[in-house]
Amino acid sequence: MAEFLRIRRGRIGPADVGLPLGPGLRRAPGLRREELAALAGVSMDYYTRIEQGRETAPSDAVLNALARALRLTDDEHAHLLALADRAAGRTPRRRPVDPQPVRPGLRLLLESLRPGPAYVLSDVNDVLAANPEGLALMPGLDDWPPAQRNTIRYTFLHPAARTVFADWDRVAGNCVAHLHTAEVTAPGRTAALVTQMCEASSEFAALWRRHDVRVKRGGRTAFRHLAIGPLTLANEVLGLVGDGQRMLVYQAAPGTAEHDALLLLTMAGEQVGSRARSS
């Protein structure tokens, strides 16, 4: 919580909140502690104790005031409250969930969504199950052992990712921002993945230190796929209640060029499946 507040304070300047620059040189970017404390309506001493980790149980009223002063988004505000629960040792508002096996009904749903690429993901983006098109959409993902398949690991560490994701910077930023939301629901698994990724990728480490927080929701993703060419697909993220899992589905409207491309992807996916069955 203290680190999150300190970093976010450094990313919002006086002009952003209607304050004058004031006298003297600023040794660091962003608001001074006394400025943020005044905006939030708390004493500087009390805010300093929070930011230094000496006050671990600020009230929701104080946290809400800090969120408003820092112009946090709804996702960032919820993340701050969750971090505060953990710092104070309170029962978290979003309880950690142990990994669960993928239910047979979900595997059947993956098949029914074809030719749309679809995945069941853990809260830290482990690929728990995928249909053939899902594996084919990310070339090389199927070369990794199932226990190593993770979309964040793929994005930063697989050499094909920077080609297949046409807007790699946006995809990379979004997946790291979403991983921050798993710090509460899966603290141990998040810490293990972050340690591994920070050691393997300086780009991941830099994005992680930014403390951007965004829950992954639906959108559009552009691909440059070697087998089917360039295409942009809509995607939806569906939460699976009680399992600590999400379903990610890419889709295209029937009759469009993108849907025709997905039919070609099915052929590539069948080749992936044949290799997997023979190995």
Image: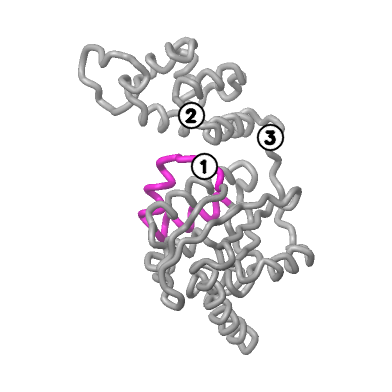
Q: Position of residue 169 (x, y in %)?
A: 37, 54
Choose the circle earlier in sequence order: 3 or 1.
3
Residue segment shown in magenta? 190-216
Viewer-closest of 241 and 79: 241
* Residues at circles 3 and 1 in contact by the CB criterion of under 8 Å: no
Choose the circle earlier in sequence order: 1 or 2.
2
Residue 35 disc label:
none
Of the residues shown, which amino acid type is indicated by label 2?
A: Leu
Viewer-closest of 80 and 53: 80
Provide the residue designation for mark 1: 214
| Few, some or many residues within 10 Å of mark 1 (<14, 14–19, 20+) | many
Mark nearest the camera among 3 and 1 is: 1
Provide the residue designation for mark 3: 92
Q: Is residue 249 magenta?
A: no
Provide the residue designation for mark 2: 72
Of the residues shown, which amino acid type is indicated by label 1?
A: Arg
Q: Please, which colouring scheme is shown?
A: one colour
Q: Position of residue 39 (x, y in %)?
A: 43, 14
| Few, some or many residues within 10 Å of mark 3 (<14, 14–19, 20+) | some
Viewer-closest of 218 and 1: 218
Mark nearest the camera among 2 and 3 is: 2
Q: Residue at x 71, y 40 (%)?
A: 95
